[in-house]
Image (tube, rainbow, N blue to C red):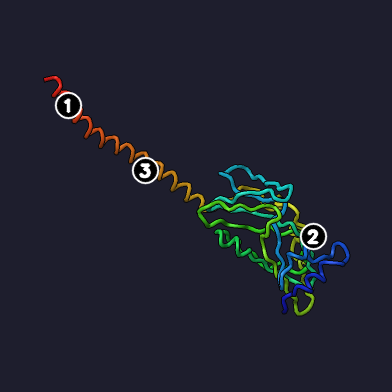
Amino acid sequence: MAVLSFQTIVKHSKDVPKGSELIEPFVESNCKAASYDLTVGSEAYIYRSGKAVHIQKLKKKGQSFDVPPGELAFVLTAESLHLPDNISARLSLRLGLTCLGLILGTQPPIDPGYHGHIMCLLHNLGHREVTLERGQHLLTIEFTWLDEGTNRSFSCAASPEKYQDLDSLEQWVTRPMTTEHYRLSQEIRKIRKSYDRIALAALVVVLASVVVPIILFVLARCWK
């Protein structure tokens, strides 16, 4: 198997019949030596304190959303793929985003025959919010030639209609989702608040045990 080069990616994405573009829309400046940068698309979902599922719409370039510390985010790419039966693909997260604390959930290779947008699962392992905006470079995709066209392409898989032509997160994200890390962080916050209240109460008791006798002593001296 061989990885597709810049020239080959361009060849299969430009000046080809509509609907057969390897990447659509295709921006040549996003194409690297042997990969292509996919960008943040029109939808994102972030868990929000147990609320019902709400897909955030990013209607124009530059609109943004925040991934809270310890939380998950599902993001739809702006680009869609049209893989022939002799090309598969793999995804990785842009290094700059990894340095901010984001990691990409494990995703299997994209099988030949797939067409549609890409949904990725991000996890913020950092201690700060990470802001992403529509049009921002998000994923790097690498395409690989098969030794021959497969006769078991994506369209032959069980229930292919469930997976093909993905164009909205609503097809997949149907219930609130969060992480155990987030739940534990919430529990720790509650414990800290309880501890702070107990510590404050103890401090008041200590101060009272010191201050009250002093006040009584002073008053007693004044009454003499």
Q: Tell us which disc is closer to us: 3 or 2.
A: 2
User: Which disc is residue 218 wearing?
Assistant: 1
Mark 3 vs mark 1, foreground winner is 1
Discs 3, 2 touching: Cβ within 8 Å = no
Disc 3 element: helix
Mark found first going from the N terminus, 2 or 1: 2
* Mark 2 or mark 1, whichever is nearer to me: 1
Give the left or right position of residue 17, taking residue 167 as reference.
right
Q: Is residue 155 visible?
A: no
The residue at the point 71 percent across, 59 percent down is 118
Residue 48 shows in this picture: yes
The disc placed on residue 195 is 3
Residue type at numbered disc 3? Tyr
How crowded is the residue under tag 3: few (<14 C-alpha within 10 Å), some, or many (20+)?
Answer: few
Query: Is residue 47 left or right of 31 when viewed as pictured?
Result: left
> Element type at marker 1?
helix
Q: Place residue 156 in its image quadrant.
A: bottom right
> Label 3, label 2: how many angstroms apart (C-alpha)?
54 Å
Spot occupied by residue 133 in the image (x, y as percentages of width and height): 67, 52
What kind of element bears circle 2?
loop
